[in-house]
Image (cartoon, rainbow, N blue to C red):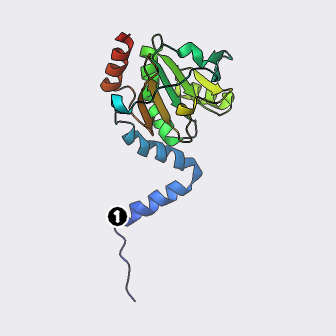
């Protein structure tokens, strides 16, 4: 009978599998792994492939303070939309970069961080992480071009309603390229 030798890599592999099985350690490990992806800056969609919102009407949201928001109010403005959840590892991984961007641009860009979770869960997550962004919950469905079944899903929309960025998965939203894009969109008519 042949004896199996345990190497360090085998031991590390077994430990990693055990840690992923234990519910309390699974989420932090997944977030850690997604943080590497969240270092990547998203890219702009080429002009000939950009979709345009047909209408801003019909999408109603409510923010973290109970204020209703009709998407019509975003028409003619630069908009950052992120669909996310507090239990989603890639969402958690990219959230610090979104919060940094929000702190610097929330007075000039409409930020809609949309979750379908209960307000209490989101508020607890926000407080625990000291995030300053406002979150929104949908009262009605988003326009068809913005509907998604994946999270995180992020869109940046210019003043004319063109979707200039459409990113599924974690990304670094506080990158120079995203900031330059927002600055350019804010300058344009």
Q: Which of the pair 15/74 is nearer the observer?
A: 74
The residue that appears at 41% across and 39% down in the rendered structure is: 35
Q: Quadrant of residue 186?
A: top left
According to the picture, the residue beneath numbered tag 1 turns out to be 8
- The x, y position of residue 153, in whole percent, is 49, 35
The residue that appears at 34% across and 36% down in the rendered structure is: 40
Quarter of the picture holding the C terminus: top left
Q: Quadrant of residue 126?
A: top right
Visible residue check, residue 45: no
Q: The residue tagged with tag 1: helix, strand or loop?
A: helix
Relative height, residue 103 to residue 170 (above, below): above
Q: Which of the pair 126/108 is nearer the observer?
A: 108
- The x, y position of residue 175, in whole percent, is 34, 26
The residue that appears at 57% across and 48% down in the rendered structure is: 24
The residue that appears at 37% across and 33% down in the rendered structure is: 49
Horizontal arrangement in the rendering, residue 15 relative to residue 5 (left or right) = right
Q: Quadrant of residue 116?
A: top right
- The x, y position of residue 174, in whole percent, is 38, 25
Q: Which of the pair 106/166 is nearer the observer?
A: 166
Quarter of the picture holding the N terminus: bottom left
Q: How many marks?
A: 1
Residue located farthest toward the bottom when viewing the structure as drawn: 1
Q: Which of the pair 107/73 is nearer the observer?
A: 73
Graded by Cα atoms within 10 Å as few (under 14), some (14 to 19) or many (20 or more), the crowding at tag 1 reads few
- The x, y position of residue 26, in whole percent, is 53, 49
Visible residue check, residue 15: yes
């Amino acid at each position: 009978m042949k004896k199996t030798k345990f190497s360090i890599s085998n031991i590390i592999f077994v430990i990693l599998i055990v840690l992923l099985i234990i519910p309390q350690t699974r989420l932090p490990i997944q977030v850690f792994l997604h943080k590497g992806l969240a270092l990547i800056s998203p890219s702009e969609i080429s002009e000939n492939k950009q979709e345009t919102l047909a209408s801003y009407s019909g999408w109603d949201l409510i923010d973290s303070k109970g204020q209703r928001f009709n998407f019509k109010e975003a028409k003619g403005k630069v908009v950052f939309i992120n669909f996310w959840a507090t239990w989603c590892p890639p969402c958690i991984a990219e959230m610090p970069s979104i919060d940094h961007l929000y702190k610097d641009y929330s007075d000039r860009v409409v930020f809609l961080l949309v979750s379908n979770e209960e307000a209490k869960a989101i508020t607890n997550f926000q407080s625990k992480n000291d995030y300053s962004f406002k979150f929104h919950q949908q009262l009605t469905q988003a326009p068809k071009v913005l509907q998604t079944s994946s999270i995180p899903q992020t869109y940046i929309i210019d003043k004319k309603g063109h979707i200039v960025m459409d990113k599924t998965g974690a990304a670094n939203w506080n990158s120079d390229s995203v900031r330059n894009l927002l600055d350019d969109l804010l300058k344009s008519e």
